[in-house]
Image: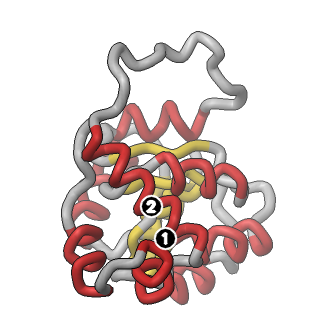
C-alpha cells in the first residue's frame, strides 16, 4: 500500500482517480492547487500525480518545489494537453513519467512503477500530421518563454488572442 498525492484542479476527475487508487489498495490524497500540495508535503508521499494545467498555471513550475520537499517521491505528470515539449521538460525537471489523459488507473500505476526506460517502446507507424507538428511547435515556444502567452505570441509574430484560442483547443491527435 502506498501513499499517493494527486494534484489536480478537476475535483470530479480527482474523486474518480481516488476511488480507483483506493480500490487497488493505495492511500490517495488530493490537493487542488500548488499551495495545497506544498502544505500536504508535511508528510511526504511515496508518489505524486501532477496535472500539467493547474487552473491555467503550469504544473511544471510546481514540480521542482515538490521534489525539493519530497526528494524520494516519484512524480508522474498527467495532462489533457500533451506535447513533446512539455513531456521533455517534465522529465528534465525530475518527473519519472508523463501520461496523456485519458489514462486508466492501471496505466497511471504502471507509469509510476516504471523504474527504467523501455527500449522496446513501439515507434509510431506514421509521422505526425501538419496540425500536430504545429501544436508541438506552439508548445515548445511556449515552454521556452516559461508559459508566458504574450512573450510567446511576440516570438511567433502572432496576435496574443489568436494564440490563446489555439492553446485553448485540445491537442490534435497524431
Query: The N terminus appears in which quarter of the rendering?
Result: top right
Question: Whole-percent x and y of residue 160?
Answer: 31, 86
Residue 33 seen anywhere in this rendered image of the structure: no
Kindly indicate the quadrant of the structure image that contains residue 173.
top left
* Residue that protrudes farthest toward the top in the picture: 120
Question: Whole-percent x and y of residue 5?
Answer: 52, 63
Kindly indicate the quadrant of the structure image that contains residue 117.
top right
Residue drawn where x is 71% and y is 76% of the image: 65
Calculate the distance from the C-alpha at mark 2 to the C-alpha at mark 1. 5 Å
Q: Nearer the viewer, residue 19 or 86?
A: 86
The residue tagged 1 is 142
Q: Nearer the viewer, residue 171 or 32?
A: 171
Question: Whole-percent x and y of residue 166?
Answer: 24, 68
Kindly indicate the quadrant of the structure image that contains residue 71.
bottom right
Identify the element where label 1 is drawn. Answer: helix
Residue drawn where x is 60% and y is 86% of the image: 39
Is there a contact, CB below 8 Å, between mark 2 and mark 1? yes
The residue tagged 2 is 139
Q: How many marks?
A: 2
Identify the element where label 2 is drawn. Answer: helix
* Residue that protrudes farthest toward the front in the picture: 157
46, above or below 114, in the image: below
34, above or below 81, in the image: below
Residue drawn where x is 44% and y is 44% of the image: 99
Q: Nearer the viewer, residue 154 or 112?
A: 154
Question: Whole-percent x and y of residue 165?
Answer: 20, 75
Amino acid at each position: 500500500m502506498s501513499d499517493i498525492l494527486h494534484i489536480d484542479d478537476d475535483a470530479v476527475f480527482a474523486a474518480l482517480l481516488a476511488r480507483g487508487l483506493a480500490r487497488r489498495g493505495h492511500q490517495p490524497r488530493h490537493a487542488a492547487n500548488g499551495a495545497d500540495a506544498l502544505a500536504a508535503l508535511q508528510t511526504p508521499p511515496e508518489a505524486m500525480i501532477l496535472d500539467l494545467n493547474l487552473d491555467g498555471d503550469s504544473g511544471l513550475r510546481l514540480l521542482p518545489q515538490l521534489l525539493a520537499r519530497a526528494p524520494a517521491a516519484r512524480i508522474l505528470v498527467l495532462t489533457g494537453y500533451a506535447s513533446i515539449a512539455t513531456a521533455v521538460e517534465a522529465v528534465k525537471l525530475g518527473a519519472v513519467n508523463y501520461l496523456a489523459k485519458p489514462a486508466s488507473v492501471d496505466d497511471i500505476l504502471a507509469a509510476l512503477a516504471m523504474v527504467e526506460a523501455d527500449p522496446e517502446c513501439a515507434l509510431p507507424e506514421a509521422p505526425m500530421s501538419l496540425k500536430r507538428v504545429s501544436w508541438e511547435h506552439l508548445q515548445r515556444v511556449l515552454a521556452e518563454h516559461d508559459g508566458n502567452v504574450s512573450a510567446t505570441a511576440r516570438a511567433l509574430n502572432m496576435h496574443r488572442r489568436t494564440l490563446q484560442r489555439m492553446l485553448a483547443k485540445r491537442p490534435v491527435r497524431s
